[in-house]
Image (cartoon, helix red, strand yellow):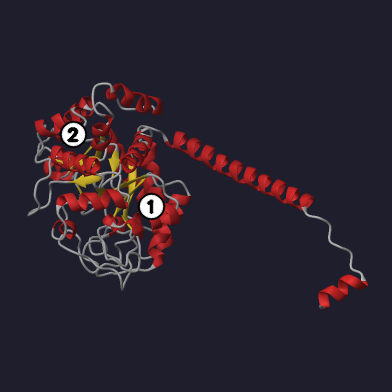
Amino acid sequence: MKYFSALFLFVLPPLLFAQSDSLDIKIGQMVLIGYPGPELDTTVLDAIKSGKAGSIILFEKNVPKSTTAFATLKKVLWTYQHAAPIPLLICIDQEGGRVNRLKDKYGFPRSITASAMGKAKTLDSVRFYAEAIASNLAGLGFNVNFAPVVDVATNPDNPVIAKAGRSFSANADSVTLLAKEYIIPHRKFGVITALKHFPGHGSSEDDTHFGIADVTKTWTAEELKPYRELITGGYADAVMSAHIVNKTLDPKGLPGTLSNRVLDSLLRRNLGFDGVVFSDDMHMHAITKHYGMEEATKLAINAGIDILCFSNNIQNSEESTANRVHSAIRKMVLSGEISRERIDLSYRRIMRLKSKLGQSQAEVNRVEAARQWQRAADAERRLEELKKQQAATKELTPPAEPETKKTKKRKKN
């Protein structure tokens, strides 16, 4: 089950519908869950089997602390994947450097920070380490890496981005270039990447893990540039939202993850992104200290989040099982607080993303080339239709009356 065709993904769900409520299946694809330790978790396994969770996420606590870590972890991930009725997204934050779940002390390849990659004199550094990360993830069975960080390090004192070395650069063009080089090896090995943290966390003075981070006075539109360029260039497999507050973008002050203005208006309509949007961890205190689980979930889905991440990895945040999250979403759909159409839209995006699993860079390039050709053909067709309409309008317009002494007199009057 390493590779899945688009045909398989779109044919399989109807077969499941005959045995279960299609709404249950669709909601399950929107749930991403974390679990406690390195052992196979039977509760999570049951949630995957029943279709209540379409994605899982792993942290360092889930990595076996032994010399056989690779083989043991691979077996666990294999078991989860093969239990899934619809191919499972197996996710990890493997940026490199500080955000590095698969450490070399457990026998995995050494990695460096994005900042260190950005300071190298050539692109060889980012290419080398990105390929090491991607090949290792693919070998283990991971198919989603929540990276690269495309936040622009505009605030050198930012505690969660710049000081942690998680940004490639303080220059938006450099961030775009390096992010592209980071993404290419992941596609080579069939690993999906997610650009984060939209709409930009680089100027913050606070960490959303611990509370609200308001960037209203520090954020600039330059922070959107990497997203715009990577989306336009076809390098955005998925996007991860930020919990930052930006009243310039959302006057109500809703965190980005919960804001329709940020996700639907800006990301979807303005920047033209129609792929999957993952939420940042819904257990971060920027969310949990200000919103209940159900309210935050409702706002996030209605804002445009497709997959909600509940990591169960942050202290003092209430545990969220896949069943609990699934049940809450289902209840809100049945009550009309979340529309079925909204669930359907996310489901289609998720299925489209899952159809990319295992694609090589050459296949990705072919698909993107076909899409660009189709867009150009559509634009040319619309132009021809417009010309025909203009010509038809011109034919129906009566000829102008020749100017005579009488018409000149009428104009003066």
Question: Does any portion of residue 337 appear in the rendered image?
Answer: yes
Q: Position of residue 65 (x, y in %)?
A: 9, 39
Looking at the picture, tell me which residue is in the foreground, 328 or 180: 328
- Quarter location, residue 250: bottom left
Q: Position of residue 88 (x, y in %)?
A: 26, 33
- Mark 2 touches mark 1? (CB < 8 Å): no
409 horizontally vs 378: left or right:
right
**Residue underneath mark 2:** 70
Identify the secondary structure beneath mark 2. helix
Q: Which mark is residue 179?
A: 1
Looking at the picture, tell me which residue is in the foreground, 370 or 161: 370
- For image coordinates 18% across by 27% down, the residue present is 79
- For image coordinates 61% across by 41% down, the residue present is 377
Quick check: 263 above or below 29? below
Q: Position of residue 411 (x, y in %)?
A: 82, 74
Q: CA distance from mark 2 to mark 1?
A: 27 Å
Q: Amino acid at mark 2?
A: Phe
